[in-house]
Structure formats: structure tokens, C-alpha cells
Amino acid sequence: MIGITRRKCCHCEELFLPDARNFKRQRYCDKPVCRKASKADSQRRWLQQPKNRDYFRGSVHVQRVQRWREAHPGYWRRLKARPVALQDPLIEQVPVNKQNSDISGKAALQDLLIIQQAVMIGLIAQLTGSTLQDDIALAARRMQQSKP
């Protein structure tokens, strides 16, 4: 990181390396105690501005908050949604011909193809810079249709 120098944290006074995206304004390190101090300082500075001093006071603001709470019931109790997988779950296929499906000691052709397919998908994801299933499928179709 060229041009980014270590700084002294305004709370713990230890040297730290600021984040590259925010190095000009970052005055606190990433320790939880220092982050809490940063938040308190930020709120204090915001409330010191004349236009913000009475932002949370008065009947107008009480009514504003009450209207918002009526419009958003259970906001504080709401659970966070679980992340959704980027690809659909695989459906297990039952072997049709049991004679050919029980080959012990030899690697099945489909296992070899699955490994090659995973490698190919990884390669396409690296080339396109996207891990989304739809983007990989579109890129694979384009590659398949292009003539050498």
C-alpha cells in the first residue's frame, strides 16, 4: 500500500494501518472498544451541530417516531433472513441399471465427468470474474457456440 502510513488511534493511542478505502478520514483502529469510542465521538459531533441539537426532542419528533413504529411493527424483534444459496440443490438420481452401477474398484465415468465439470466451471468463473450460476451458464454457452 503505497502512500498509506500508520496512524495513532485516537482512543487507545496505538499505531494502526488505516483501511485503504478510508485512510484519509480513519482516526480509530478496528478494536471493538475503539470502534465504540469512534461511534460515541461521531454522535457527539453530530449532536453539536445547531441543526441537529433538537432532532430527537419535541412533540413533532415524538409523533414522527410513533408513526414510523406503527408502520414497522415488530422491527426490533424481526430475525435476519438466512442467506440463499446461489445454485439449486442437486436431485439425487437412482441408477436404472444395477448391473452397470456396481463396479467396485474402478472409478465411474460419471465421477470423472463430474470432477472435470467442476474444474471447467471454476475455470469459467475465473475467466469471467463471476461466481453466479447464470453468468457461468451464459459464458459456457458463448464458448460452446464460438467457432475455433
Image (cartoon, rainbow, N blue to C red):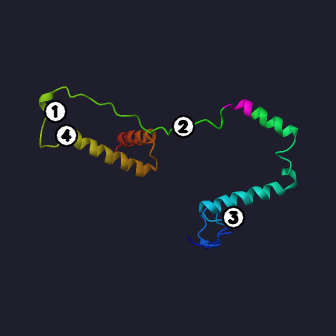
- Dot 1 crowding, Cα within 10 Å, few <14, some 14–19, many 20+: few
Q: CA distance from mark 3 to mark 4?
A: 58 Å
> Mark 2–mark 3 contact, CB under 8 Å?
no
Residue pushed farthest top? 96
Depicted 42 relative to depicted 7: above or below: above
The disc at residue 81 is 2
Residue on which the image places disc 1: 101
Measured from the top left, where is residue 135 in percent x and y?
A: 45, 41
Q: CA distance from mark 4 to mark 2?
A: 40 Å
The disc at residue 109 is 4
Depicted 45 relative to depicted 14: above or below: above
Measured from the top left, where is residue 22 in percent x and y?
A: 64, 62
Segment tinted magenta in the rendering: 69-73
Measured from the top left, where is residue 43 in percent x and y?
A: 75, 55
Q: Is residue 107 magenta?
A: no
Mark closest to the chain's N terminus, 3 or 4: 3
Q: CA distance from mark 1 to mark 4?
A: 11 Å
Query: In this rendering, would 144 be left or right of 36?
Result: left
Q: Residue at x 27, y 41 (%)?
A: 114
Amino acid type shown at disc 2: Ala
Q: Residue at x 85, y 44 (%)?
A: 57
